[in-house]
Structure formats: structure tokens, C-alpha cells
Amino acid sequence: MNRGKNIKKLAVICLAGMTALALASCAGDTDPGKNLLMSEEENDRIVDLFSPMEKMEPDAENVARSATDKTVILAEEQLGVKVGYITYTAENYQEKTYDEIAIDRVRNNMDDVYLLNPDAIQILGEEGKLQDLSGLDSAENLREIVKTANVVDGKLVAIPQEVVAYGLFINKDMFDKYHLELPETPEDFLECCRVFKENGIDTPIGANRWWLENFVFAQAYADLYNGGNTEAEVEALNRGESKYSDYMRPAFEFLQELIDCGYIDAQKASVSEAIEGEGEDFLAQKTPIVMAYWGAANTETAYGKTDFELQVIGFPSHRGQMPVVPMTGYAVSIDAEHKEDALRTIDVMVSDEALQIYAETNKVISPSKNVEVDCIPALKSLNEKIKENVYVLGSNAGMKVEQWGNTCLIVRKLLNGSTVDECMAEFDKLQEESLRK
């Protein structure tokens, strides 16, 4: 029970803030079970959306409309519907996480549309609680990466408004100072860390307790997602014919080597929050390498304004630099009260027209293969990889063992002193549990 609760908390913290899942506060003592913007006119066509954010006041001055809000307005104008936001706040829900509340609301058919994190998509998809979205016109334009991540039992159960990509954030000036090429493979990466260490850089890698799993995914699944046999390999894992631990072991051994060599401060990483723990040293050029998500390079409060040349590259793998992509998405309840209008609303919100607006506003990778937005120079390398369909998924609703949250928790065990064998036993246990379902 505690494990499941921790995973749900983890998914929100890891992904919130880099997608539309940025938590926003509600004013006053609003009843969380009521629609915040419900129209007073009974005859209005209403679509209820459960989300962590409030809708911007349409007449507010000097307030930048959120990217998602702009797409909602587009749907309202085109369809003649009113989208009512039901907003999550930690204050209203006490100890319950966004994922826990979202899952409960879907199970009890309380809303029409939901913004879901990867583990919620997987759980609810397996329970048959989410509508198949593959018949929407907009679904035809989706990149394969989205379809791979959010298909459960042959059904596309969620569609995101952006593709969140993780990479290594590199101080290129420090690499140039020591005549180092940007690393492609684990061996390249270890050599770079060795050179930095020998030249007085005490901890070459700035890490936190959330994002080291990206090293694991890049190495464990480089072949699975880029070897042309993804579906068969996933099916073998789901049937128990292959073991997750066999995929994961080399990557955990790599992380252990980084810890043993002092390239990562495991004690500090195990208690550090994302960016807060390592960001200051990176910006001060004391640490040449950190890991973060795409949007952090565009945000001045993260790494969007540096005094050095910033480059964002994929994580090392034997196939070269590898972006890691977890996937969120909008979903419609299978028993939604306003199902037809909800489906039409989602179809507009993830249409090419809406996604162009969204991508231009947030400067992100679009889930549509038809939408491209110029990115800053620091992100070009990562962007090119994804355009070439070179990536690994950090979440895959088609895998019976949830990936993003589970792997992060097991990596944390490694940071806190568990052996690689003990970590692999955790994966074996999770797989055995999934086979009994």
C-alpha cells in the first residue's frame, strides 16, 4: 500500500511543472467537488475538466494566457460548449495526491475530461475506464511516440499537448576547457567524468532524487525502442518470457559505478529536490552536468539564462545519445455524462491548429507530426533526435509494470545503499505481481 502511494506522489512531482500539470492554487475555501466555472444557464452545453490548474479570467489585464487555456477557448468557440474546470489543490485534498484524486474521480464518473499522469493512464486504461480516442480526427496526426506510450489493450486512451523530453544539460565551456567531446556512450561518459574529477571537479554530475532514472531508461531500453521489435519485446515482458531486471541490470551497474567513483554524491542526491539541489552549482559552473526536462532550458528560473554555452543532449547508451520521454495526456471517461461533447472538445484541443498555438506559446515539442516550432540552439541536438524517432520512453501504458514511478523509487534505493542485486529483486517482484493480475 505504501509503495503504491509513493509512486502516485512521485509521478506528480516528477512531471508536474513541465507539462500542463503545473499545480495552481484555488482562492478561498472552494469545495473541490464543485465545478469552479459552471455556467449559470442550465441549457449551456458543459464539459467538465478535472485538472491541477484554474482557468484564467478572460478579462484579466496583463496576464499571459496559459497555453492550455488558449486551446480550451478555441474548443469553446468552435463547438459552442463551456468547459468547466474542477481544480485540484493539495490544500483541499489534504494528504491525497493529484493522481489518487484523479483515479478516484474517474472510477466514480465525476467528470468528463481528465489530465492524467503516466501511472494513472495505465491503471485506468487497464480497468477499461477510459474512452478509446483513436477514432478522433486529430489522432491521425500523432507521432508514433504518443501512440506507443498511451495505448492500452489496443486503445489510445490519452493524448498529450506536448512531448516532454529529458536530457543531459551540459556546460559546453567546461567540456571545451578540457578538450572533451560530448559523450555518446556510457564509456564516453565515464571518461568525461574521470577527466573532470582529476582536474578538481569534485562532483561532475549534479543529481537529485527524481531524475537519475533517465540514465537507466536510456541504457535499458535503447534497443527495445530503436531496434525495430518494440511490440514483441513489450509483449514478452508482459507475459513474463523476458525479465525487466535483465534489461535494467547493466544500467544500474553503471549508476553504481558513478556512485563508487564519486561522480555522483549519492547522499546529497537522495535528499535533493529537482533543480533546487543541483541547479545552483550548475549555474555557478562548479558542476558541468545535470539532468532536466526540455522546458528547463526555456525557463529563466531554471536553466534558461546561463553565463556559459548550454547544450542539451540525450543520455548515453550504446546506440548513442538518447532522449527519454515520459508521457502525460488528456483522457475521457468511458461513462462521461457529456461524452460526445467531451470527445469533440479533446479533438479540438489536440488538433493541429490548437497544438500549433500551444507549441508556439510554450516552445515545446508537439505530439503532432505536422507541428514544428523553432527551438533555442541549446535544444537542437535533443530535438533532432526526436525528429529522427530516436528516443526511449520513460512511461509506457502498454507495459504491465509501471515504469516511471517504480524505477525512480528503486534508483532511490540504490542511492541509499541497496545493492544492484537487491534492486533487481525489486523489479522481479513487481513483474511477478503484474503476472498474477
Image: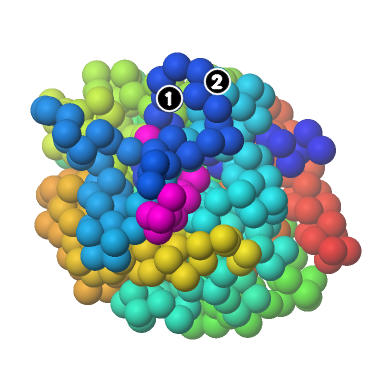
Name the residue carrying label 1. Answer: 26
Question: 372 left or right of 398?
Answer: left
Does 426 appear in magenta?
no
> Quick one: 117 or 213, which is closer to the camera?
117
Vertical comparison of 39 with 288: above or below: below
Contact (Cβ within 8 Å) of mark 1 with mark 2:
yes
Visible in this render: residue 9?
yes
**Residue 172: image location, x then y, percent:** 19, 39
Name the residue carrying label 2. Answer: 91
**Residue 253: image location, x then y, percent:** 62, 47
> Quick one: 324 or 220, which is closer to the camera?
324
Secondary structure category for the residue under label 2: helix
| Residue at image coords 16%, 53% | 360
Visible in this render: residue 71?
no
The quarter of the image holding the N terminus is top right
Amino acid type at circle 2 is Glu
Does 52 appear in magenta?
yes
